[in-house]
Image: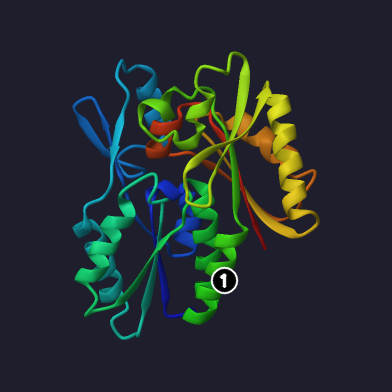
């Protein structure tokens, strides 16, 4: 039995395709501009293709949010598919501090308000820190949860989801203007490996500087243990064109948390445009 709640997100959630299909999650893609070509994130450009192209380019790729009509199209498609049901749409998106995607979704929701109620949510997160929330809600919806139950769980997820990430270089975040409070780290790194996170407002921020990857992973371990202890959790590890490193991080995290489910996923072209190849992230939420 499925509920009357339908889930929409955007491509920055970096949710594996098998989970999108399994839990009937609708995705509106952002765009990546590389030279004279424009691609739809995850549709006409895979993460693997993106990192290959990125390495051969002299100029940095840029990104753009979907237009409101692209959200309208998806919302109306869902209404048409479920026209005999009194559906509600939960539309969850990348932090408004990092992208204008939320604004496009909100404008689209106004355009369809006579046809369907769309609740547009600023996750204040990005990549699989958004994705892990979306997947949990989609699971509930598939199991028949009411709109009220989904909303209650959403509040919990927004309070209980954390992300830490490591980048090989701050160059991409800096040049694309997404560096936020981590700007204080520029020029002081040398061989340091910054551990980054997101503020409560959804801005990139420094957590701690570490000398080397091993020390950085130790900092993440301590932070996650302090926050979650023995509580059951779901985790997702994301990697930017570095599968082996992603697998190693997943194995490492699995040794010290009470994990219920794990997901290993690619960081897609849009997020990868701002972080670069080699980025690793771990997203955790209470089960």
x and y percent of residue 118 in the render?
A: 33, 72
Is residue 267 something one can see in this rendering?
yes
x and y percent of residue 243 in the render?
A: 57, 32
Q: Nearer the viewer, residue 207 or 40?
A: 207
Residue at 22% from the left image edge and 63% from the top image edge: 73
Question: 193 left or right of 4?
Answer: right
Residue at 36% from the left image edge and 32% from the top image edge: 177
Q: Residue furthest front?
A: 184
Q: Is residue 24 above or below residue 241?
A: below
Within-10-Å neighbours for mark 1: few <14, some 14–19, many 20+: some
Residue 78: quarter of image: bottom left
Q: How many marks?
A: 1
Residue at 40% from the left image edge and 71% from the top image edge: 6
Residue at 29% from the left image edge and 60% from the top image edge: 105
Residue 254: quarter of image: top right
**Colour setting:** rainbow
Is residue 139 something one can see in this rendering?
no
Which residue in the protein does label 1 denote?
153
x and y percent of residue 264 in the render?
A: 59, 44
Instruction: Pick the quarter of the image with the C terminus.
Output: bottom right
Q: Is residue 89 above or below residue 4?
A: above
x and y percent of residue 99 in the render?
A: 34, 46
Question: 196 left or right of 84?
Answer: right
Q: Nearer the viewer, residue 181 or 143?
A: 181
* Element marked by disc 1: helix
Q: Is residue 153 above or below residue 68?
A: below
Q: Is residue 63 above or below residue 232?
A: above
């Amino acid at each position: 039995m499925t509920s009357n709640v339908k889930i929409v997100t955007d491509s920055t959630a970096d949710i594996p395709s098998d989970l999108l299909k399994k839990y009937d999650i609708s995705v509106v893609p952002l765009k990546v501009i590389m030279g004279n070509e424009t691609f739809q994130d995850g549709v006409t450009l895979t993460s693997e293709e993106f990192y290959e192209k990125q390495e051969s380019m002299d100029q940095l790729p840029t990104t753009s949010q979907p237009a409101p009509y692209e959200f309208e199209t998806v919302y109306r498609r869902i209404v048409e598919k479920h026209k005999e049901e009194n559906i509600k749409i939960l539309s969850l998106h990348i932090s408004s501090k990092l992208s204008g995607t939320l604004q496009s979704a909100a404008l689209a929701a106004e355009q369809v308000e006579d046809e369907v109620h769309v609740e547009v949510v600023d996750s204040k997160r990005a990549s699989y820190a958004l994705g892990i929330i979306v997947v949990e809600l989609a699971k509930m919806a598939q199991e028949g949860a009411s709109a009220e139950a989904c909303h209650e769980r959403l509040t919990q997820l927004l309070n209980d989801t954390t992300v830490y990430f490591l980048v090989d270089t701050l160059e991409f975040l800096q040049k694309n203007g997404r560096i936020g409070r981590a700007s204080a780290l520029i020029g002081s790194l040398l061989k340091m490996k910054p551990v980054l996170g997101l503020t409560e407002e959804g801005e990139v921020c420094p957590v701690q500087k570490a000398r080397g990857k091993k020390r950085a992973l130790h900092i993440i371990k301590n932070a996650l243990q302090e926050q979650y202890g023995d509580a059951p959790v779901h985790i997702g590890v994301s990697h930017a064109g570095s599968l082996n490193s992603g697998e190693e991080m997943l194995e490492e995290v699995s040794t010290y948390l009470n994990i219920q489910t794990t997901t290993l996923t690619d960081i897609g072209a849009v997020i990868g445009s701002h972080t670069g190849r080699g980025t690793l992230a771990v997203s955790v939420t209470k089960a």
